[in-house]
Structure formats: structure tokens, C-alpha cells
Image: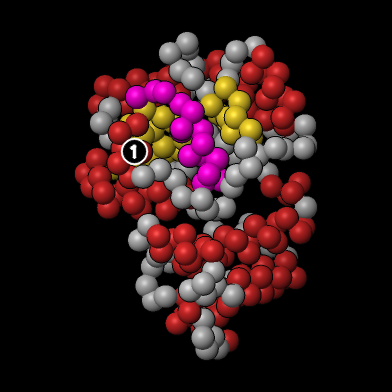
Amino acid sequence: MARTIRQSLDSLLPQLDDSFEVVVCDNFSNDGSAEILEEYEAQGKLKLIRARCNRGEGRQIAFNHSQGEYIITGLDMDDTFKPTLPNILREYNAKHSEFMVVYETVAVIPRLVVEKVGGWMPLSAYEDVEFGRRARAICGSKYMRFPAASAIILKRGNKKHLGTLRMLREIYVRAQISYAMNLRYPDTPNPSPVRRKVIAFVRWTAVRLLTNQSQTYKILRSRGTLSEPQPSECTRDLTKRNRRRNCRG
């Protein structure tokens, strides 16, 4: 993330005036990101919180240290942003100020809605999707979805630099959460035949190991966002045909 964080902040901060606060939760990164964030914090441009956390916990920690009447979440530090945020927020305040408005992965949410929904769950992936499911169920018509984040995000981060082992671990975790929540796996752009087989095997293994006692299952069950049938029933006898259907690999 150190490769992109400065570019990301420089594309975002000039769009915000003194009425905004920028809260960043850093999971004790050791790739140079912390030093860059400390530099911006020393300039008074953001509030830096350092804590051991996954993605869901990080969003919740940042929210707990914020004070605004509404928040903007999903502005990840490996993305760069278009200079459109002021216009989007102006329209939000004029027309949708009581609503949770979602631009694919970026969301503008009233503080009261976050508190009513119960915040983010401690998930390592799809924490925003899970939050959105509860928000739709609890808030109903107060939830609005727009088709894409392209109105805000200019360029998304590239995860190729994560390394093979970390990429496989991320695929594994996402496969478990995706399957438990009955989500479609995101397509891998132009995978080689070998890479496609490796990803399919990792996903299949992740699903086979997802049981009623797994941490992922317990977290999702605690908030009622687990899809039926239960993973233990789905993974008992996976034939080759079922693997293709369930793993979408």
C-alpha cells in the first residue's frame, strides 16, 4: 500500500475542507505506509489510529474515533479519486441526507444509520457487503444504491504486489465468506489455465473446511446474515458437478 497511499491521499484531501475529518486505521503496517501516514498526521491532515485489526474491525475503529453526522467509507488507500467528491456530497446534502447512499464500494452513511445497524462485523473480506445486507433489512427505503463507484474512483489499487502466498490466503478467506453469504465470486481477469485451476482448488478447499464451528460461520451467524442452507450441509458430499456450481471456480 505504501506504493499508492501518498497518491491516494493527495487525490482525496484537496477535495475536503475543514468541516471534514479524515480518520485512518493502520494495522501496524511495516511497508512504509505508517511513516507516510504519520507525516500527514503531523501536518494535521488526518487522524491516525494504529490497532491490530482486520478490514471490518478497521472500519469500526475508524468510525468510533469519528464525530461527524455522516461518514464516507470505502475510500481505500490503494485507490485514487476523481475530483468529484464535493459535487457528490453537495447533492447528497440536498437530496439524500437521511439515506445511506452506496456507490458500489463507496458509501455515504448517516451516523444514526451506522449505530442503528450495529456497525461492521470483524470480517477479513466483504465486510461492506455484509453491512449493506443488514442496512437494507433494517433501514428499508432509507438504503439507496447507485450503479458504480466510477463517479468517485479514478483508479483502483493493484494487488499483484501482495505476493503469491498472501494472494492465496485472501482467495481462501473470500471464498469462505462468499460461500457462507451466497455471493458470486468476483471474476479473475484473464487467468492462465494453471492459475485458474489453483484458484478453483483453493476455493473448493475453503468451502470444504467451512463448518458450523468455524470462526467465519460463527461471526456471520451472530448477526443473522448467514445464507441457507448451512455450510455443513452444503459441503458434506461435494461431487465434481457440485464443486463447479458451488465454487464457481
Location of residue 215 (image quadrant)? bottom right
Q: Secondary structure at mark 1?
A: helix
Along the horizontal axis of the image, is 104 left or right of 172?
left
Identified at 43% across, 13% down, the residue is 19
Q: Is 133 placed above or below 10 here?
A: below
Q: Is 124 placed above or below 230 here?
A: above
Q: Is 61 placed above or below 140 here?
A: above
**Rendered-image quadrant of the N terminus:** top right
Circle 1 Cα neighbour tier, 10 Å, few/some/many (<14 / 14–19 / ≥20): few
- The boundaries of the magenta stretch are 55-69
Identified at 46% across, 50% down, the residue is 121
Along the horizontal axis of the image, is 175 left or right of 99?
right
**Residue 87, image x, y percentages:** 39, 21
Q: Nearer the viewer, residue 233 or 187?
A: 233
Identified at 41% across, 64% down, the residue is 221
**Residue 96, image x, y percentages:** 27, 30
From this viewpoint, is residue 144 visible? no
Q: Nearer the viewer, residue 246 or 150?
A: 246
The residue that disc 1 covers is 115
Q: Amino acid at mark 1?
A: Glu
